[in-house]
């Protein structure tokens, strides 16, 4: 194997270091040595981070009871251009390990697993510290085999948010503002804007963005696929870019900013409900849909059942997620049981299971579905 032919395929390198506490290692590298965070994952409870400075890139991997070991390099390459017969792992002197990694590997989406998930809003113990000092509440602890993550995020302190320009390698990602407000800016989507309670955004794959500031106690609900995905910093990108390109495609998706106050209510797929559609279905070419539901006015405002063929109240989609934004309701099912849901509670309803939603006055539900139109 020619050294020159191998070198020509490499696009970057990472020195892998194991650590016992990720935050302590990040703080040391950033405050003492001038490193900057380039990637961190997963957002809700980080265990891996990539930092760089001085021509060096370090990948920190948190391992309980870690002990120092031999150097481990990851070289980011174009596998198709590697010399024939090149193994994916090379061994060097003194136990050094060099892994040749695809620099442009597609996002891995694990196989779907259908199950019923019910999460209640509990006390402070249910929140954990995540990226940029934000507090995270895990709404799908099982991750449905790693396919989906849903987080209830709290920004406890108002004012500037210690965020940086970054992007996510995802298949699908939505941010819904539940309470307060958050000021955001996105690549090629004009000036910074304020996301108010009831508003939401579709974050297409790898769109650069930044959280600038928030009201004290602001809350957002974030849904992503796959569950564990990379968040990369982009220090070379300055936002806003000065451009407004609403038709720009990011991996076949368009950016969406849904403003609740400017959107009328319309029919819902659930009889007895009306819906405020966010436009995300069209922007993702039917991949996913996001709506806010409330009881329709009139006599239909009673126990309602989802549309289905052959199995009333069941769907055959990939993902159906409900989050109670306000009020309360009763969720009933012959196979899932009876459950009272209150503000802050959420559930994932598996394909094939019948269900009924009986609303109380004042109910508002956030509904996220993949695909946008659930097959019956």
Image: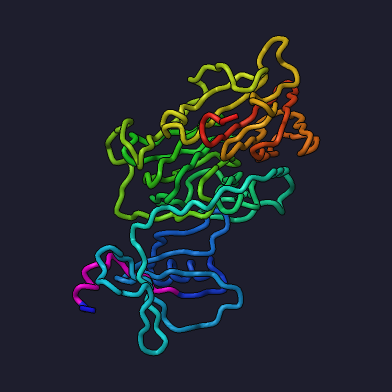
Q: Is residue 203 visible?
A: yes
Would you say residue 245 sits in the magenta stretch?
Answer: no
How is the rendered protein coloured?
rainbow
Q: Position of residue 9 (x, y in %)?
A: 25, 67
Tell me which segment is drawn in magenta. 4-16
Residue 296 position within the rendered picture, expressed as x and y whole percent measured from the top left: 66, 16
Q: Nearer the viewer, residue 145 or 277?
A: 145
Q: Residue at x 42, y 86 (%)?
A: 95
Q: Quadrant of the C terminus?
A: top right
Q: Residue at x 60, y 32 (%)?
A: 367
Residue 19 position (above or below residue 23)? below
Q: Is there any visible trace of residue 180 in the rendered image?
A: no
Rendered position, 156 above or below 86: above
The residue sitting at 47% across, 28% down in the picture is: 258
Q: Is residue 169 left or right of residue 82?
A: right
Q: On the rendered structure, is 344 left or right of 214?
A: right
User: Eyeballing the image, is 32 above or below 131?
Assistant: below
Horizontally, residue 45 falls left or right of residue 184, namely right
């Amino acid at each position: 194997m020619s050294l020159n032919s191998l070198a020509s395929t490499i696009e970057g390198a990472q020195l892998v270091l194991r650590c016992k506490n990720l935050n302590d290692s990040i703080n040391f590298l950033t405050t003492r040595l001038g490193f900057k965070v380039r990637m961190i994952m997963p957002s809700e409870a980080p265990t891996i981070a990539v930092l760089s400075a001085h021509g060096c890139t370090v990948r920190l991997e948190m391992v309980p009871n870690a002990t120092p070991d031999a150097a481990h390099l990851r070289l980011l390459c174009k596998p198709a251009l590697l010399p024939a017969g090149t193994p994916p792992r090379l061994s060097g002197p003194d136990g050094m390990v060099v892994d040749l990694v695809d620099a442009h590997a597609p996002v891995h989406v694990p196989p779907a697993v259908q199950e019923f998930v019910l999460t209640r809003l509990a006390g402070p113990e249910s929140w954990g510290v995540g990226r940029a000092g934000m507090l995270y509440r895990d709404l799908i602890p099982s991750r449905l085999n790693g396919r989906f993550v849903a987080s209830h995020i709290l920004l406890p302190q108002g004012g500037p948010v210690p965020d940086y320009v970054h992007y996510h390698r995802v298949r699908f990602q939505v941010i819904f503002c539940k309470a307060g407000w958050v000021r955001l800016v996105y690549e090629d989507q004009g000036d910074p804007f304020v996301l108010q309670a009831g508003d939401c955004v579709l974050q297409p794959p790898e769109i650069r963005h930044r959280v600038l500031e928030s009201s004290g106690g602001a809350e957002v609900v974030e849904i992503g696929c796959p569950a564990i995905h990379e968040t990369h910093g982009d220090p070379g990108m300055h936002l806003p870019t000065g451009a407004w390109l609403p038709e720009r495609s990011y991996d076949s998706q368009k950016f969406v900013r849904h403003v609740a106050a400017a959107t009328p209510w319309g029919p819902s797929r659930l009889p007895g409900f009306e819906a405020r559609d966010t436009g995300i279905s069209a922007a993702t070419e039917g991949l996913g849909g996001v709506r806010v539901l409330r009881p329709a006015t009139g006599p239909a405002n009673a126990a309602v059942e989802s549309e289905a063929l052959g199995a009333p109240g069941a769907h055959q989609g990939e993902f159906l997620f409900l989050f109670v934004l306000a009020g309360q309701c009763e969720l009933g099912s012959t196979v899932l049981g009876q459950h009272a849901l209150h503000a802050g509670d959420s559930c994932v309803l598996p394909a094939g299971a019948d269900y009924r939603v009986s609303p109380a006055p004042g109910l508002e539900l956030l509904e996220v579905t993949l695909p946008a139109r659930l097959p019956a």
